[in-house]
Image: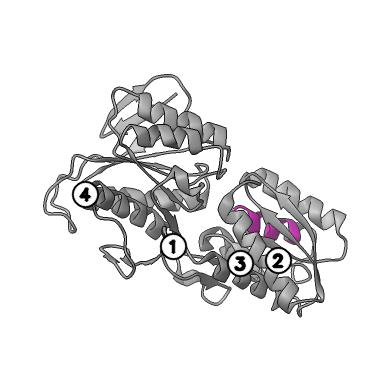
Amino acid sequence: MLMIVSGCSILSNGDGYEVIYTNKSTNQSATRQEESDHTIAIIPKVVNIPYFNAVEEGAMKAGKDFGVEVIYTGPTVADSQEQIKIIEELIHNEELSVDVIAVSANDPESLIPVLKEVRDQDIHVITWDADTLAEGREFFIDMVDPETLGRHLMDTLAWNVDEQGKYAIMTGARDAANLNEWIKWIKIQQEEYYPDMKLVEIAATGDDPNKAYLTAKRLIKDHTDLQGIIGNSSVGPPAAAQAVKEAGEAGNIAVVGLSPPNPMNEHLKSGAAQVITLWSPKKLGYLTVALSENIIEGIYPYDGQYIPGAGKIRVVGDSVIMGEPIDFNKENVDQYDF
C-alpha cells in the first residue's frame, strides 16, 4: 500500500510502500524568501532502522526550511528490486509530480535502467549514501572520503586488539557500492600496516537487525579465536556488541564500526564495544534535500560551496563529500543524540 501523508490526508493505491512527506512550510524559510512548488523524493536503502530514521529527520527539516515537499519512502528490506518498484511508483503516479529522485542504492548496476527512464522524463536523479554507476545519476553525495573512512575503521580495530589476531567484517547489502569500497580500504590498510592480523570472513546481513544478530552469534561460534568484528553498516555494531555481551566475551572480542551513537550508548559504556564511527545522518538528509532544491534551480555543487544548514562541502569529480568521520566512545557518547 502506497500511503501519501500530507497534513491529515492519506491516499492509498494498494502496493505496499509507505510514503511520508511534509507540507510546504507556511512560514518563510530561513534560507528561501518564498515557498517552492518543488517535490523531492528521497529513497533510502531500507526504512525503520535508526540510521535511516535520522536521515529522514534531517530531510524533513530541510523540507520545512526550504518550503519544498519531501517524499521519504523506501523498502522494508534492503533490496534493489524493491527500490525499483518504488521508483516506478513515483514516476507513474499521476497524482505526483516529482522534480528530483535521490536514492541510496542497494546495488550500483540494477537501478540503472529505471533511473535512465526517470531522467528521460526530465526528472533529476542524484545518489546519496550509496552510489550507482555514473550514468545513472547527475552526482553522488558521499558522507566522507571512502579511503579515509575504510582505513580509519581498520585502525580503530587494530588499536583495540594490539594489532594482532583474527577479525571478521559484518557488512550490509552484499552489492552496496559504498560498503564494498570501504571493505576494499579496510583490507588495504590491514595488509599494509597490520600484517599480524587476518581477515577470516566477510558476512552480509542485508541491513536486517535480526539477521545481523544471528550472524554475529555464528561468527563468534565459528571462529573461537576471533579477536574483533568490524561492522561497516549501521546494524552491524549493535548486533555484534549484543552477541559479544551474551557470549561473555566483552573485552575479549573488540567491536568497532559504523553506527549512530544512541543504539551503541550502553554497549560502549559496558565494554561490549570499544569505538564506533559515523557522521551526522541528519545532516546527510538535510544536505540531500538542499542540493536537490539547488539543482532544480540550476545550481550545481562546487568545491567549497556553503550550504545553509549543512556548512561547506567538498566536491571531487562528480562526488560531493559532506565532511569528516566522528568517533564515539564511552567518554563522549553522551554528548550526541541521534
Query: Which amino acid does the dot numbered 2 rest on?
Result: Lys
Q: Secondary structure at mark 3?
A: helix
Residue 294 in view? yes
Q: Does label 2 or label 1 sit earlier along the sequence?
A: 2
Q: Residues within 10 Å of mark 3 (few under 14, many from 20)?
A: many
Looking at the image, the residue that sits furthest to the top is: 14
Which of the two discs, 3 and 1, sits closer to the camera? 3
Q: Is residue 255 visible?
A: no
Identify which amino acid the numbered label 3 is placed on.
Answer: Gly
Q: CA distance from mark 4 to mark 1?
A: 26 Å
Residue 297 marker: 4
Find out whether the residues at labels 2 and 1 contact each other: C-beta distance under 8 Å: no
Question: Label 3 vs label 1: CA separation?
Answer: 17 Å
Q: Mark 3 = which residue?
A: 150
- Mark 1, Cα crowd under 10 Å, few <14 / some 14-19 / many 20+, is many
Q: Residue at x 38, y 60 (%)?
A: 283
Q: Which residues are magenta?
A: 235-244
Predominant secondary structure, magenta span: helix
Left or right placement of residue 129 versus residue 272 in this view: left
Within-10-Å neighbours for mark 4: few <14, some 14–19, many 20+: few
Mark 2 — residue? 187
**Does label 2 or label 4 sit earlier along the sequence?**
2
Q: Residue at x 29, y 39 (%)?
A: 99
Instruction: Identify which residue, 245 or 154, lies in the foreground.
Output: 154
Classify residue 210 by image quadrant.
top right
